[in-house]
Image: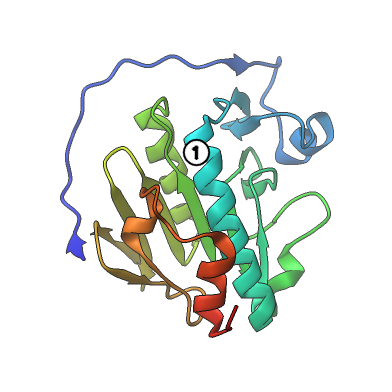
Amino acid sequence: MSKSVLTLYPETETQEVLLADRPITFEEFLQLFGEDDLVELVNGRVVSKMAAKTPHEDLFGWLYFVLRGYVAARDLGIVLGSRTPVRIDGYNGRLPDIVFVRKERLHIVTEDAIVEAPDLVIEIRSPGDRRSRVIGLIADYMRIGVFEIWLVDPQEKVLRVFWREGEGYKDFEFRRGIFRSRAIEGFWLKVEWLWSPKRPKEHQALANLLGWKL
């Protein structure tokens, strides 16, 4: 584990935006768009997300299976995937790759969205992800007070974690070894698994976490 160092990158970016004649509210966003629409609400504008590539979906599937299975087995709360909107404020909503909400806070999970800060948010960065979008995501999650935020970057082979401490956040980089979540009690993983083709199969990793014999 190492403390993150701030680096600045010059970058030119474009993105597809759907504009109305006025800012769209989060409630209108939920009414206009559904689980088949790969879009987010950013400052009252509807912004498209890039379709995920196979490596992204493979890692997402592995993490989702292991996290959801672990949380369910321990009765810790709920893990949801990338079609669950998270309300940031009246004019902003995000679709994280994976979210976790503790059992004691399940009242914030409605049929249409998560209306307050989840306990854990995970974003997996794809090669084509705009850096400005990633920074905007993290800033939004911090703004609503998400306790633990993961940014998984398979290209750079780094897991960047932001932990809320007091009124601010501290961020750390993990490139190898064991990472232990503070949001999900008892959950850990070997950081190298996140970008290794030799990661254990989902059921093997879950059994190891739970102390089950296969």
Residue 18 spot, x, y in % from top left: 65, 16
Q: Which residue is mark 1?
A: 56
Q: Nearer the viewer, residue 152 or 192?
A: 192
- Left or right placement of residue 139 versus residue 75 in this view: left
Identify whether 163 is placed above or below 86: below
Colour scheme of the picture: rainbow
On the image, which quarter does residue 202 sit in?
Answer: bottom right
Q: Residue, x 49% and y 62% (percent of image)?
A: 145
Q: Is any part of residue 117 visible from this angle?
A: no
Total numbered labels: 1
Which residue appears at 26% of the width and 41% of the height? 156
Question: Quick one: SS at disc 1?
Answer: helix
Q: Position of residue 116 (x, y in %)?
A: 64, 60
| Residue 184 percent location from the top left of the image | 52, 75
Quadrant in which the C terminus is drawn:
bottom right
What crowding class fits label 1: few (fewer than 14 Cα within 10 Å), some (14-19), or many (20 or more)? some
Q: Residue furthest front?
A: 214
The three-letter amino acid code for the residue at tag 1 is His
- Say whether residue 155 is visible: yes
Q: Residue 74: name its quadrant.
A: bottom right
Q: Is residue 181 shown above or below 210?
A: above
Q: Residue at x 71, y 35 (%)?
A: 25
Tell whether 2 sits left or right of 185: left
Who's the residue at 77% across and 37% down the image? 35
Q: Quadrant of the N terminus?
A: bottom left
